[in-house]
Amino acid sequence: MTSPGELERTLRENLRGEVDFGAAARALTTMDASNYRRVPVGVVAPRDAEDVAAALAVCAGAGVPVVPRGGGTSIAGQATGVGVVLDLTRHMNALVSVDPAARTAVVQPGLVLDRLRDAVRPYGLTFGPDPSTHARCTLGGMIGNNACGAHSVAWGTTADNVSELAVTAYGGTAHRIATGWTGAPDGLRELVTAHLGLLRTGMGPVGTAPGMAPGTAPAFSRRISGYGGLDALLPEHGVQLARAFCGSEGTLGVVTEAVVRLVEAPPAPVLAVLGYADESAAADAAAGLLPYGPLTVEGMAEDLVGDRGRAGGGAPALPRGEAWLFVEMPDEGGARALLRAADPLDATVVTDPAAQRALWRIREDAAGTATRMPDGRMAWPGWEDCAVPPARLGAYLREFRALLAAHGLRGSPYGHFGEGCVHVRIDFDLVSAAGVARFREFSGELADLVVAHGGSLSGEHGDGQARAELLPKMYGAEVVRLFGAYKDVWDPAGGMNPGMLVRPARLDENLRFAVLPATSFAGEVARCVGVAKCRTTEPGGPGVMCPSYRVTGEERHSTRGRARLLHEMLAGEIVTDGWRSAEVAEALDLCLGCKGCRSDCPVGVDMAAYKAEFLHRHWAGRIRPLSHYTLGGLPDWLRLIARLRAAGAVNAAARLLPVTVPGLAPERALPELAKRPFTRGTGRRPGAVAGGAAAASPPARGPAPTPGPAVAPGPAPTPGPAVAPDPSPAPGPAVAPAPSPAPTSGPVSGPAPGPGPGPVSGPGPVVTLWPDTFTEYFAPEAGHAAVRVLRAAGLDVSVPRSDRVCCGLTYVSTGRLDRARRVLRRTLDTVGEVSGPVTVLEPSCAAALRTDLPALLPDDPRAARLAAAVRTFAETLEEYAPDWRPPRLDRAVVGQTHCHQHAVLGDGPDRRLRERAGLVGELSGGCCGLAGNFGFEPGHHGVSVACAEEQLLPSLRAAPRDAVIQADGFSCRTQIAQLGGVRARHLAELLAEGL
């Protein structure tokens, strides 16, 4: 038998693409977006069809199986394999050509769907099938799974939109298939001819619903299970070879090129949202809407929407009801006609594109919410997309809910109601033996229920390992034997993706949770289900995740890739060095700690937290990198400099001496320290209530700066925070961590102790203004401005001793968690019980106090109370001075929303405050790229600059000349100053100047 080393050498000799049998490459491809895990022997990234043929010939000669892989978003396990994984995304990702007149495009299998859609949009065209993973799924994967999406009610499945395929079989033989027998493998025509009767009568689901005799149920559009398109080979159907190949899940051969059909995109679609009394009523109504020609008919219920659908976020409020249908129509006339016929409880028609997008985001957010139960438990795939004829959907959902309850399981159905396709994730226990047994029992009973309603086990995503074992329930044994014969014609050696569809593995084998230890950290890592939203390559909108992946394009630098490496590190089978793993350290090195994944990932993966825990253990008992001492210990160094009153000397040395500080990136200018810290020299009296910083050093008045060269304040590292997961044992991945404390709606009770600057008078509640490290030592002008504005709003201000309080941010971001805990305990001792809001000007510090503090000190009740009291500057004004009217600035505004503000704090109050002040425009999304200590660490400068070039710097260049530049985060202001040559200011500074 060929050894892995021999196979690797032979592949390298015969291919021009990359061949990687290393631990990291294998670890990154053990899983897709399913519950399953299979360990490959190696990964090959072929450059072209010739490379694919060579790889298949070499692997066939060695008897090693092959699995083709695109975006790895399959939810049934079909994108995992035990042999060689072909990564078709790295090189074979081209849009070869577009023919607008013929409405066709030639694509390679690794092309991401959105790239195709973007390319053909100028012609008024699109590709009809549009799964929710459209920003990262590939055309090859869509062909493999016969993907559908929301618009299939109008434009069909992928099989309906493919006209020709170039396929390479195991062993290297090339085929070009379309319509007719040309290009078919030997024996296929004979196989079809011998089974014409079975193909004509046996391919429908074995239905037993009322009015349907067993085996006579009519086919419907979402019959995706098995080789569901095999009857396309019938002569009366035109012998559609390419159509029959779609949905084969990599078990027949590798698609190397495809000719796909395009459809005309409606220029101005209209969205009708229909409210119903409950989910069943909405499902019952869906089939009746189809004669009106909708483009989509999507359904969801109250248990997925919650308060997010009750107006807000720029979206119109959902109509009255407990369940809703989202129906997209080509024009407003059609939408109005549909409403007259639909008889909903309530309805609205939305013509504004922005409002439509906001409503669709509610639907998309609901899809993410499905992965978590209200109590925080995770819900898992496995029965993600069963489908029944639309007329049966209401009855099916009622029985499905009853079946869940009978097994003590929970899930929230939603999906493509117009085609009877239901998505749901269920809170299976896939760790314990009893839980896995229940998973198996439930799966069999649900398959029986689907078949009883004339449905398909898979209506969109394929069967893979999750459902293939149950295909005899749907098709019967004779048809399943025909499926096996069909595979054997294409793949007589059985080397293409074995264990899927035909002669499958059991549905409860190869579960990915079985290899993990029973710790809470393992449960956190396992929550990454692999939907790969982090693999989106195009920036845009407010989202942040995942900036390092968008720069490098490497899977190991995506949130999913890092989670996979941590998973395999804990499993210990491939990555064998445990917490000392070099592979994991390399992948995490380019994690910016932006926390974008915490909010943007559908399951709330918090890679910054995992990175902090890894660094904590990775460097335990060893000398750390210098940056962990220089940047990680920044508050200590700054306090020492302030105590020595040496800020001027340090600034002069930084300007005059061409010395690179060890542990800092040589490309970065050193930050300039403020001559006087925020809290110094303001009449502090021992034991006084703090407050009068503004009087001692008021901010300068004058117009806001315009874009253009300016003297920037000295840039300072603002290390990105992380939350350290508790490493104590926990039951397993089905148990979610306790949610972080939510902000309270009012002040936390208790006195506000501690000395500080002199008192500030005012009738309002006392606001504790947090002297964070960056405001204190680098940007005191922001602190003074905040005091002035808060006083103007009628609030008293108290400032704790800056040398005794710290959020621990820099220690967390460098993985010095024991030090962080000591610092935070000292902080709690100093602050004691707070009364009123704790206003934190630096978003990263506010995020650290709100999330890291209670996570690191879960047993100290003071931590949760302080975290709940934390407010941003805008939150404080909105909650505690709601009637205050800010000065009108009436200017355009550009700049950066801090990534931690986006991920942890939210920016709704900031947007509303800017609007009230007449600041018009949107701040940049994404990450500025400096990300605290990240951009100052050696080796990170290129990635840091590339992140800034995605959204931030282009927005500054395109800004009006009189625009003001806002960035509340000191990292963001520093990046803007260093790379943009302009000065950005905190929102407090802008408002103070307008007073």
Image (cartoon, rainbow, N blue to C red):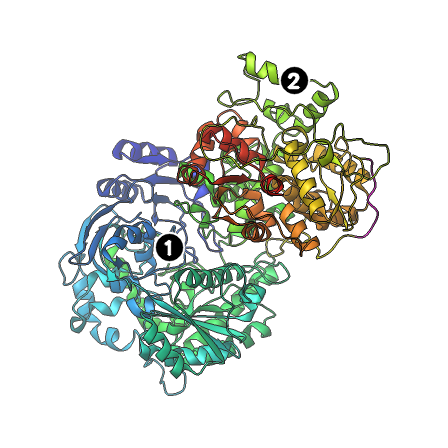
Q: Residues within 10 Å of mark 1 (few under 14, many from 20)?
A: some
Q: Position of residue 708 (x, y in %)?
A: 44, 31
Give the residue type that dot 2 points to.
Answer: Gly
Front-lying residue, 182 or 955: 955
Q: Is residue 307 visible in the rendered structure shown here?
A: yes
Q: Position of residue 97 (x, y in %)?
A: 20, 48
Quadrant containing the C terminus is top right
Q: Earlier in the sequence, mark 2 or mark 1?
A: 1
Give the residue type that dot 1 points to.
Answer: His
Q: Is residue 577 visible in the rendered structure shown here?
A: no
Horizontally, residue 636 falls left or right of residue 979, namely right
Q: Which mark is residue 865?
A: none
Quadrant containing the N terminus is top left
Which secondary structure class fits the magenta region best? loop
Give the number of the mark in front: 2 or 1. 2
Say which residue label 1 marks. 134
Vertical comparison of 517 with 717: above or below: below
Dot 2 falls on a residue whose secondary structure is: helix
User: Does 351 appear in magenta?
Assistant: no
Segment colored magenta: 749-755
Say which residue label 2 marks. 648
Vertical comparison of 340 with 354: above or below: below
Vertical comparison of 266 with 683: above or below: below
Dot 1 falls on a residue whose secondary structure is: loop
Could you tell me if the residues under marks 2 and 1 are in contact, i.e. CB atoms within 8 Å? no
User: Does 751 appear in magenta?
Assistant: yes
Whole-Å distance between the Cαs marked 2 and 1? Answer: 54 Å
